[in-house]
Image (spheres, rainbow, N blue to C red):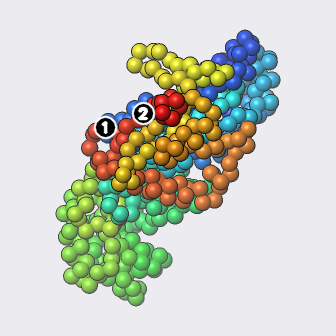
Amino acid sequence: MAASLSTALLTDKYELTMVDAALASGAAERRVTFELFGRKLPPTRRFGVVAGTGRILEALERFEFSDDQIAWLEAQDYLAPATLEYLRNFRFSGDIYGYAEGECYFPGSPLLTVEGTFAECTLLETLLLSVLNFDCAVASAASRMTIAAHGRPCIDMGARRTHERAAVSAARAAVIGGFVSTSDLEAGKRYDLETVGTSAHSFTLLYESEPEAFAAQVARLGPSTTLLVDTYDIAKGVENAVAAARAAGGELGAVRLDSGDLVAHAFKVRGQLDSLGAHTTRITVTSDLDEYAIAALGAAPVDSYGVGTRVVTGSGVPTAALVYKLVEREGVPVAKESESKQTIGGRKVAGRLFDDEGYASEELLVTGGTWEETQSVLKDAGARPLQHKIVDGGMLDPNLWGPGAVEEAAAHHRRSRNELPYPAWRLSEGEPGIPTRVSAIEDVRS
């Protein structure tokens, strides 16, 4: 059976049963506010990176129940006829405010604020969380890796290490976090990302000899290609690679190292390349890299990093641990009081404060007042507003997921990360890069 284009069933059953019960009781149309946020950051994260907002808007455009889906739900026999009719006609008509893609975030940051009826906001919960929990985890890992790389390019090569569709989303998130390209062609096509790749060890093993394999690759891809030199002996591989490029009338673009002691090999290969006069030939390394391995290669003569498993799995943090909680009902703040899972009631509007040197010093969350009032208060406090409207009465902002959206998100992340104080850039475990403060609008005004 062909997969449905609708995103409406990318959800948990209890979202529908809650809507069913709320419709029956008459509470489904109550106006509410939900916030999507993280209670805390993982110990190894000093900040998180927002990624996935554009994918959410793509998904919301297709969030409607098809006739086939309604028929299947009806056959399951747990929803009332009135609920099935509600779902049949469903289109989200509320408002969503969000942090810009690429923005850094901290504990309590309201990445998304969703306003509408209880029924329509509830139906979106699982979809919003599934997208942002994955994409933010990948983008946060990618950002740490690009910090460790100190300006050397990082390339996503993780398509074979995760679900085939997750790989596409991971590539997008990695680029937002600072990566420059991906090996995944579907991601390249869908999100206009630069794609890279040349050959694997199997290509070398296909031929009778390494020189024959290199000659075949150079003949098709040109001397500027990247040749994988560690199928056999690395030193001999480098010699054969340089010779193959020169036989074709050019200088070799790069060699790739994929095994062994990458630091030691990089120094030896750089020396060998220079001795052969191949001063412009670059060195790229792969093989189970993460931010710590990349940092360890900082002093080595490496030009770029290809990262696979660790980036697409969040480098030890596969989910951003974000939650989606009701904070206001008919204008009245509400909050959970559960042990260790308390929430702060009331809609929160976020801004970022800066010290005298221009570095971020605090995440300020203001409660109370209208949107316009809180924006004015943030401005008077010298805070940079962090949220903007991405869905207005059910209408999606096309600028956030159309052409150029990923490029702009990556640029926004660079700006946001550069605002953070130095401790936020550390790879070691520690406190969030800046603290979060929640204040009533009256306290901020005073």
Query: Residue 353 placed where, x, y %?
Result: 43, 45
Q: Give the distance between the C-alpha atoms of the residues marked 2 and 1, in whole angstroms.
A: 15 Å
Quarter of the image where one finds residue 131: top right
Query: Residue 41 placed where, x, y %?
Result: 38, 35
Residue shown at 41% from the left, 35% from the top: 436
Residue shown at 36% from the left, 79% from the top: 252
**Which label belongs to residue 431?**
1
Q: Nearer the viewer, residue 169 or 74?
A: 169
Q: Which residue is mark 2?
A: 437
Q: Nearer the viewer, residue 159 or 199?
A: 159
Mark 1 residue element: loop
Please give left or right for residue 275 compared with residue 305 in the image.
Answer: left
* Above/below status of 32 relative to 43: above
Residue shown at 70% from the left, 45% from the top: 396
Q: How many marks?
A: 2
Residue at the bottom extreme, as displayed: 249
Mark 2 or mark 1: whose residue is earlier in sequence: 1
Tell me which amino acid carries mark 1: Glu
